[in-house]
Image: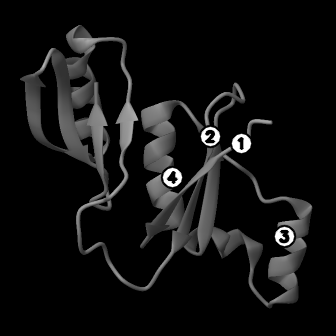
Amino acid sequence: MARTMQLSFDAQDPELLLRFWCEVLGYELEPLTEQARAGLVAMGVDPAGSGRMFAAAVDPDGVGPRLLAQRVPEGKTAKNRLHLDVRVGGPEHVAAEVVRLVALGATHHRTTTEHGSHWAVLTDIEGNEFCVD
């Protein structure tokens, strides 16, 4: 039986990071469940501020994996061992998507064509590497 998957990010500002990824992927922030809300209240945490601790985002079509960002005290210090590839439908769409993502706060590092492939390397608003191809 196949399993579902969640992609998790360490973050300085979980909700802000996932708002960026929602714009990139067409996802939506996932509201707190009643169980999560009750758990926060029991811990003495105002649920309205939970986005500073963690946030989740989902594909509204239910196809892509759930994203979770959780606050960690340390900043990013090394290259990701795993990164996301945002598929945009072919090399003819890469340049336009890079322009769109830079306007959202991404940083474009380089665009490469080799071995029959064409892609751009960017970082998100917290420095996580990803590619557009």
Q: Position of residue 25 (x, y in %)?
A: 48, 33
Q: Position of residue 40 (x, y in %)?
A: 80, 79
Vertical position of residue 66 compared to residue 49: above or below: above
The answer for how far apart the CA atoms under marks 1 and 2 are is 7 Å
The mark total stands at 4
At 19% from the left edge and 19% from the top edge, which residue is drawn?
A: 117
The answer for how far apart the CA atoms under marks 1 and 3 are is 24 Å
Q: Position of residue 17 (x, y in %)?
A: 45, 57
From the image, state whether disc 3 or disc 2 is nearer to you: 2
Residue 37 — which label?
3
Q: Is residue 13 left or right of residue 46?
A: left
Where on the picture, by quarter, is residue 103?
top left
Q: Which residue is mark 1?
A: 4
Q: Is residue 96 left or right of residue 59?
A: left
Q: Residues within 10 Å of mark 1 (few under 14, many from 20)?
A: few
Q: Amino acid at mark 2?
A: Pro
Q: Secondary structure at mark 4?
A: helix
If the image is split into quadrants, where does the N terminus sit? Answer: top right
Sequence-first disc among 3 and 2: 3
Sequence-first disc among 1 and 3: 1
Q: Which residue is mark 2?
A: 65
Q: Secondary structure at mark 3?
A: helix
Q: Amino acid at mark 1?
A: Thr
Residue 18 — which label?
4
Q: Secondary structure at mark 1?
A: loop
Labelled pair 3, 2 in contact (Cβ < 8 Å):
no
Vertical position of residue 128 compared to residue 45: above or below: above
Q: Amino acid at mark 4?
A: Leu
Residue 40 — which label?
none
